[in-house]
Amino acid sequence: MTNGSGSMVSRRRLGIELRRLRENAGLSMEEAGNRLDDLSQPKVSRLERGRVQRPRIGDVRALLELYGVTGTDAEALLELARGSRGKGWWNSYADLLPEWFHGYVGLEADAAEVSNFEPQLVPGLLQTEAYARAVIRTSPGMTDDEVERKVTVRTNRQELLHREQPPKVWAIVDEAALRRPFGGNGVMRLQLDHLADVASEPNVVIQVLPFDAGAHPAVTGGFIVLGFPGTENIDVAYLDAHGGLFLDEPPDVAWYRELFDHLRARAADPDRTRELIGKVAKELT
């Protein structure tokens, strides 16, 4: 398994630059779209948000000309657009995965930091194959082949934990996720043992949010904040609702970072977390 293609991050960086140039030119997205035959306000918006999977070089060139960008500045952005057209391993599952999840997997593959809160499930990056299979099987109407292919996608995602320069993964898991049974006691015991093992990796921190922490502001749903290297503000908050929700405006991302820090302060520290995981695992024997 190879590392991320970098294409998702390239699209995000390209989009940020296109937005900056449009604003410097004094144009709204609607005005930019209306002035070019092959573009529209929705297309300009999708380009600026990095939502076009394979940006057309002609579209980017037309926007740069409209914004008065020429020479080496234009060529640098066109090269960024060319680099954003790469494909990742997840494209082989286009028939199985929704487009929004392709976007998430691409960003995750290129992230330097993954901060994940999960209230009901073990985070996908930390799931065993058997646990993942049991979780995926709860979705109605899936064939055995579809289940196995989704399991493969999940295990492929986990390869980023073992690459030469892995991301920093910080997972906060509600105690409910440890106690909600998937696949029977044997599957859960192996999953808990796996959590204890992976928590010893230098790039992974796991904290359990115990029941006795009481109510908290994220009780209604999980979220992930992806951080990226570089000086551009391209970090993303992702809410794993139906259809997936990406938040990339800096104030929104900052809010979810603050929420994560709040949960981190209330969760058990790594030492107590190991004790809690061991306690729950022992109850399954």
Image (tube, rainbow, N blue to C red):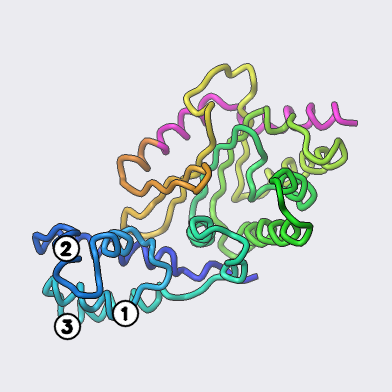
Looking at the picture, tell me which residue is in the foreground, 163 or 58: 58
Could you tell which of marks 2 and 1 lies nearer the N-terminus?
Answer: 2
- The magenta region covers 256-285
Q: Is residue 46 above or below residue 270?
A: below
- Please provide percent x and percent y for residue 103: 48, 59
Q: Is residue 26 above or below residue 254?
A: below
Mark 3 nearby-residue class (10 Å; few <14, some 14–19, many ≥20): few
- Please provide percent x and percent y for residue 144: 79, 57
The image quadrant that residue 12 belongs to is: bottom left
Q: CA distance from mark 3 to mark 1?
A: 16 Å
On residue 22, the disc is 2
Determine whether label 3 and label 1 are within 8 Å by CB.
no
The image quadrant that residue 47 belongs to is: bottom left
Tell me the residue at 60%/42% (across/down).
Answer: 205
Q: Give the amino acid type for the residue marked by disc 3 in the picture.
A: Gly
Tell me the residue at 44%/51% (across/down).
Answer: 227
Tell me the residue at 40%/33% (across/down).
Answer: 258
Q: Is residue 91 left or right of residue 272?
A: left
Could you tell which of marks 3 and 1 lies nearer the N-terminus?
Answer: 1
Q: Main secondary structure of the magenta part?
A: helix
- Please provide percent x and percent y for residue 280: 78, 28
The image quadrant that residue 252 belongs to is: top left
Say what secondary structure mark 3 lies in. helix
Looking at the picture, tell me which residue is in the foreground, 272 or 40: 40
